[in-house]
Amino acid sequence: MPSADAITVSDLSVVFGEGTARNVAVDRASFAVPKGGSFGLVGESGSGKSTVLRAIAGLITDWTGAIAVGGEPLGHRRRRSFYRVAQMVFQDPYASLHPRHTVDRTISEPLTLHGLDNIEARIERGLADVGLGPEFRFRYPHQLSGGQRQRMAIARALMLEPQILLLDEPTSALDVSVQAEVLNLLADLRDARGLTFLLVSHNLAVVAHMCQEIAVMKDGRIVETLGVAAMRRMQPHEDYTNRLLQASLGYAPEEVE
């Protein structure tokens, strides 16, 4: 029977360095993301959340535990077919785009590498789906705004029509005025295509907007998993999660005094 979960992570650990330089970036993390669901990994910087995403994407190969996508166990190296199922959108759209490649070349490259046909039609649809008109097709990244670059990165990730998007802080490098536009675009694409999202963010408002369930990470470990409704009601079970939620509310003068 096919798995009901799009992503399953069991006892995932990632260790960097040896001896006195040994750093446990992820410590026995376990969670599951149902097909069509949106799951958030939240925590402070250095908590290990992006490392989890990179291990799933195949950007980190030295890990222990088990990772399965669509019920298929993954090895430490990704087969080409994996990228037809899952794609990653990075935090900084400018850093993840080749500065000398036009929009056209960037988003057509996955199609060429995977030998897909109807490239012209796919490019036109991909640009339209992320709200970029045909006039953007032959522009370079430096000719685009931050929001337009992230739309371009999303279009590239969707070219192979994956079922899963791995989203690593997809709006944190953008101006506040643009963040909501990109989040709404992602939500619309998820609904239209039946996508599964695994979203990493330190911004709890972003996670509350996008996800049904979250896992809170601290020092490489998942300390709590809770539904977003409980998060909105400020009803976590763990003290660390409560402090993280309180911090997200902003400056509290009475606490300082």
Image (cartoon, rainbow, N blue to C red):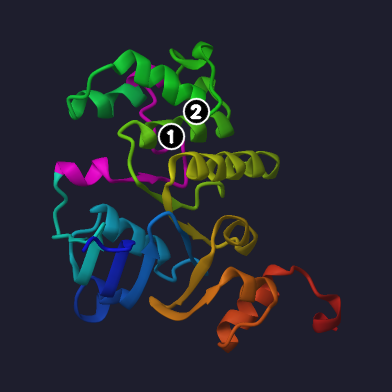
Query: Residue 102: in sight, yes or no?
Result: no
**Quadrant of the image containing the N terminus:** bottom left
User: Residue 156 appears at what percent x and percent y?
Assistant: 38, 32
Q: Quadrant of residue 71?
A: bottom left
Query: Residue 183: in sight, yes or no?
Result: yes
Q: Residue furthest front?
A: 1
Label 2, secondary structure: give it. Answer: helix
Residue 83, magenta (yes or no): yes
Residue 23, magenta (yes or no): no
Task: Say what amino acid the circle numbered 2 marks.
Answer: Asp
Question: Relative to 237, is 193 on the left or the right?
Answer: left
The residue at which mark 1 appears reads as 153
Extent of the magenta region: 80-105
Q: Looking at this view, is 188 or 110 the one in front?
A: 188
Question: Relative to 82, is 142 on the left or the right?
Answer: right
Q: Residue at x 27, y 74 (%)?
A: 10
Q: Looking at this view, is 103 or 3 the one in front?
A: 3
The residue at which mark 2 appears reads as 129
Label 1, secondary structure: give it. Answer: helix
Task: Say what amino acid the circle numbered 1 marks.
Answer: Ala
Q: Residue at x 29, y 17 (%)?
A: 119
Question: Does 101 appear above or below 60?
Answer: above
